[in-house]
Amino acid sequence: MIDNWLPFLIFGAFALIIPGTMITASFVLSTRPTHRTKARTVPFESGVSQGPPKQQRFTVSFYLTAMLFILFDIEIVFLYPLAVILRKLGWFGFTEFGFFVAILALAYVYIWRKGALEWR
Amino acid sequence: MDPWWIDAIKGFLIINIVLVCFAYTTWLERKLLSRMQGRFGPNRAGPFGLLQPIADLVKLVRKEAFMPMSASAKLYIAAPILSTFTALLAFAVIPFGAGWHIWKWDVSGVVVDAPISLVLIFALGSLGVYGFIIGGWASDSKYSTLGAMRTCAQLVSYEVSLALAVLGVVIQAGTLNLSEIVHQQGTQFWFFGPQFVGLVVFFLAGTAETSRPPFDLPEGDTEIVAGYHTEYSGMRWGLFQMSEYVHMITLSALGVTLFFGGWHGPWAPLGPLWFFLKLLVVVFLFIWMRASLPRLRYDQLMRFGWKILLPVATLNAFITALVVVAVN
């Protein structure tokens, strides 16, 4: 088992080492100013040098999108294995596929009509 | 089964080729954009500005390393590493050749020949979102946080369409192994014909997934300065840029693999060279789109993703399933 994934681990090590070295190099080789003014170390505020507001609020659409994503991603997780063996299953597989998609379509129409897909 | 040192050499070569591809994609992008806008683009460093990526690298590494005082340092540094790591790792499963017999070893044309390579690519793409959202949150700036939220929402929305667009190909090929999918296209036909709708959805969702124009809302510089990497500079910023470009190259390579027959060519068995040429054409298309199309508004982006791409992709998968089962 580990043998099959060994090349993946090796490649992963390379993929981790390269950005790691780059970050390290960017700290080691960077130019250093003799002193930093305070304005340099506050977050960018386009002229207004107050800190960021302590409490961040976001529109509810972000949360809705995240929830919808989970639903539809689960759909995909279920459809992929079915798609692989669809030829073997034949009409039985297709009926199951259609049933699954029909339920989803129903839910999709519901959330559309409820206005969950509108961005506000 | 290759011995481990062959895997190591192959992995080292491939990752370096990807990095060189990334460096010269930035060069190509600047050069092409300039020509399309009636400018010359980089032309000082070396002939045709060919040494520009190296000059950029030196400049980025030498830049002053500072971060906002209120940023949480560990996460701030880890975020670009994470996003680059996942972007680079995804290229491991892309097959680029049929495999060769060198002396007494069989060397396969893919770094990891996983039976689930397609799922692996999408999984790594999803993990990449963490890099952006951690980076934006750790900077503790309002533009970064907003940009991170936007990036997250956009990437997850279009990932659904992206994965569904590929479902048609999976149904036709009956496998999730990318090498196997390419082999099938070699023996019968390339999938861009029967899966044309899938290809279009894949390309559009892929553009959004890599946040390329016209879907570059995550760094909409007219609205939120630079999105999640507002507080990043130097090579830390460079790594975010790198992850974005590597992601684009990987997605282009995935498109070539799934729809255009991978390393197979219409004539002359050139192998990886065909793969590379097709990759270049797709990357050129991405750059061309950046030069020609204006950025969408955020509500337009969301509406397009959820109300047009998603139903079209589902319908495409459904009709493919019907045809495949009926013919079978």
Image (cartoon, helix red, strand yellow):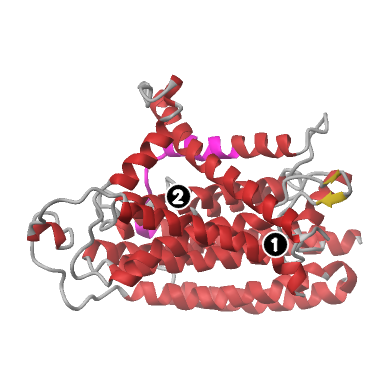
Instruction: Judge whether residue B74 can be spotted in this image.
Output: yes
Q: Which one is in front, B227 or A28?
A: A28
Say which amino acid is labelled 2.
Met
Q: Is residue B226 left or right of residue B276?
A: left
Please identify, in this view, whether the residue under mark 2 or under mark 1 is nearer the observer. Answer: 1
Please give the count of numbered marks on the rendered protein: 2
Quadrant assignment, res B33: top left
> For the residues marked 2 and 1, what is the alpha-carbon distance in whole angstroms?
23 Å
Residue underneath mark 2: B242
Quadrant assignment, res B79: bottom left
Q: Residue at x 36, y 58 (%)?
A: B298
Q: In the rendered view, tell whether residue A56 sits above or below residue B279.
A: below
Q: Residue at x 8, y 66 (%)?
A: A50
Mark on residue A7? 1
Instruction: Judge whether residue B311 can be spotted in this image.
Output: no
Residue A113: image location, x then y, percent: 47, 74
Q: Residue at x 37, y 60 (%)?
A: B299
